[in-house]
Image (cartoon, grey):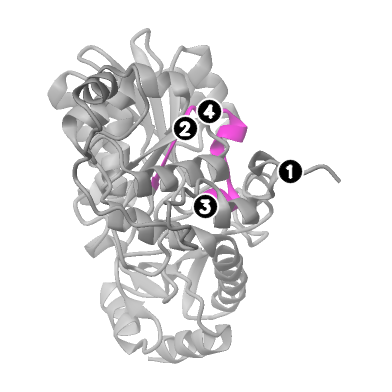
């Protein structure tokens, strides 16, 4: 059998090995290059690197060996041409917009966004003359109707935060491209294990690596995945000159997280399905939102778009008001109250008073985020202990 190149490896193998650069010491684990700058053999080498006439590292705000390994591994996993790591997920979202938009441009985005993402689209970009229109992401015709001659980008997340709606990537990408716009997708909830938006026409994919990619609540980080052309025309200069760089240490942590991402995500999904079914049978729960359940409005689309899985997140409405939701939260023992997600530990939050509290009440209600809605990030604990914990809290 002929020797395979790394490009022929299957995803789990690439998660462990892709992009590894070994120093002269031949270390097994990826080396951690904690350096801000680099030394050149001579003045000509320095000149050539700064001019782009020679490969090599210049300054860790621009690039760093450990960060580059993380970027290469993310590129292989997502199936993109290239990637740039950022300090946080929100830095990735902002970079995906500000690097190429200018005054007079227009963005169309789904209304159902993480509160900080919605701030960037709805409040921040207009300060610089970039107009925005928010649409019901499930309504394909609204995307089409919102387009203008100056529309340059579409932005969405799927599954949405927190109600886990599934948006039709292929249809929305087609509309974006028909109107000369780029489709930017926040793929945090699905992860590249379950969903690779570029396979459905997305041009740019962004991640908060803080979530499932790290997977253990240790470090902040983000990533923008795109084409070589977008990097060359827009993103490279933006990253170098504005400085939202990922630290080498955080990149090293993310590399370790990627090694187990596949098996962790599969377990998150298995546990989530069990708990979604349990919650759906409880008389104390008014409604469960989980794409893996047949009663989810976009179940068929989720099964086709997310590799047949419902993911590791659940949203559900209790039969009661905010005070009852708080009593439920306070009664939990195994599941922790936290606004983070994608952790080995199960985490739960009350979106109205945490992740989406910045939104006006009218906007929250339009998105179906009521005072009795809870968002559960299912962890890797024994699912029976998680079910017992939910049952006890529901009784309370």
Is 201 on the left or on the right of 370, as rendered?
Answer: right
Give the camera-side residue of 99 and 318.
99
Regarding mark 1 in the picture, which secondary structure is present there?
loop
Mark 4 vs mark 3: in front: 3
Regarding mark 3 in the picture, which secondary structure is present there?
loop
The quarter of the picture where residue 120 lies is top left
Residue identifier under label 4: 172
Q: Within the magenta stretch, is there residue 170?
A: no
Residue 4 is labelled as 1
Q: Earlier in the sequence, mark 1 or mark 2?
A: 1
The stretch of residues the image draws in magenta is 190-207
Residue 226 visible here:
yes
Residue identifier under label 3: 190
Mark 2 vs mark 4: in front: 2
Instruction: Classify the position of the C terminus by image quarter.
Output: bottom left
Counting from the top left corner in percent of width and height, residue 180 is at 46, 12
Residue identifier under label 2: 82
Proximity of marks 4 and 3: CB atoms separated by less than 8 Å: no
Regarding mark 2 in the picture, which secondary structure is present there?
strand
Regarding mark 4 in the picture, which secondary structure is present there?
helix
Counting from the top left corner in percent of width and height, residue 42 is at 22, 27
């Amino acid at each position: 059998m002929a020797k395979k190149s790394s490009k022929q490896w299957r995803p789990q193998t690439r998660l462990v090995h892709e992009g590894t650069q070994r120093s002269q010491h031949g270390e097994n684990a990826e080396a951690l290059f904690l350096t801000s700058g680099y030394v050149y053999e001579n003045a000509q080498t320095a000149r050539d690197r700064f001019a782009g006439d020679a490969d090599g590292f210049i300054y860790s705000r621009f690039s760093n060996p450990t960060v580059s390994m993380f970027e290469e591994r993310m590129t292989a996993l997502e199936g993109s041409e290239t990637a740039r790591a950022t300090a946080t997920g929100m830095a990735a979202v902002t970079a995906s917009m500000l690097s190429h938009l200018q005054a007079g441009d227009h963005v169309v985005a789904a209304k159902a966004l993480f509160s900080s993402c919605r701030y960037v689209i709805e409040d921040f970009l207009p300060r610089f003359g970039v107009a925005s229109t928010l649409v019901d992401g499930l309504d394909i015709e609204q995307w089409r109707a919102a387009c203008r001659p100056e529309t340059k980008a579409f932005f969405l997340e799927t599954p949405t935060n927190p109600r886990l709606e599934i948006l039709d990537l292929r249809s929305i990408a087609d509309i974006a491209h028909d109107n000369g716009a780029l489709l930017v997708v926040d793929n945090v909830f699905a992860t590249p294990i379950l969903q690779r938006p570029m396979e459905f026409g997305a041009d740019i994919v962004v991640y908060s690596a803080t979530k499932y990619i790290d997977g253990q609540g240790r470090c902040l980080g983000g990533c923008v995945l795109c084409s070589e052309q977008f990097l060359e025309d827009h993103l490279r200069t933006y990253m170098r000159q504005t400085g939202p760089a990922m630290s080498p240490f955080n990149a090293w942590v993310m590399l370790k997280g990627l090694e187990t991402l596949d098996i962790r995500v599969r377990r998150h999904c298995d546990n989530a399905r069990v708990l979604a079914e349990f919650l759906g049978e409880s008389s104390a729960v008014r409604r469960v939102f989980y794409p893996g359940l047949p009663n989810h409005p976009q179940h068929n689309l989720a099964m086709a778009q997310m590799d047949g899985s419902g993911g590791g997140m659940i949203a559900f409405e209790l039969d009661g008001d905010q005070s009852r939701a708080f009593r439920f939260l306070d009664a939990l023992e195994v599941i922790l109250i936290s606004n983070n997600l994608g952790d080995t530990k199960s985490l739960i939050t009350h979106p109205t008073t945490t992740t989406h509290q910045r939104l006006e009440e009218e906007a929250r209600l339009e998105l179906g985020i009521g005072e009795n809605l809870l968002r559960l990030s299912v962890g890797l604990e024994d699912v029976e202990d998680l079910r017992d914990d939910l049952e006890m809290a529901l009784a309370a």
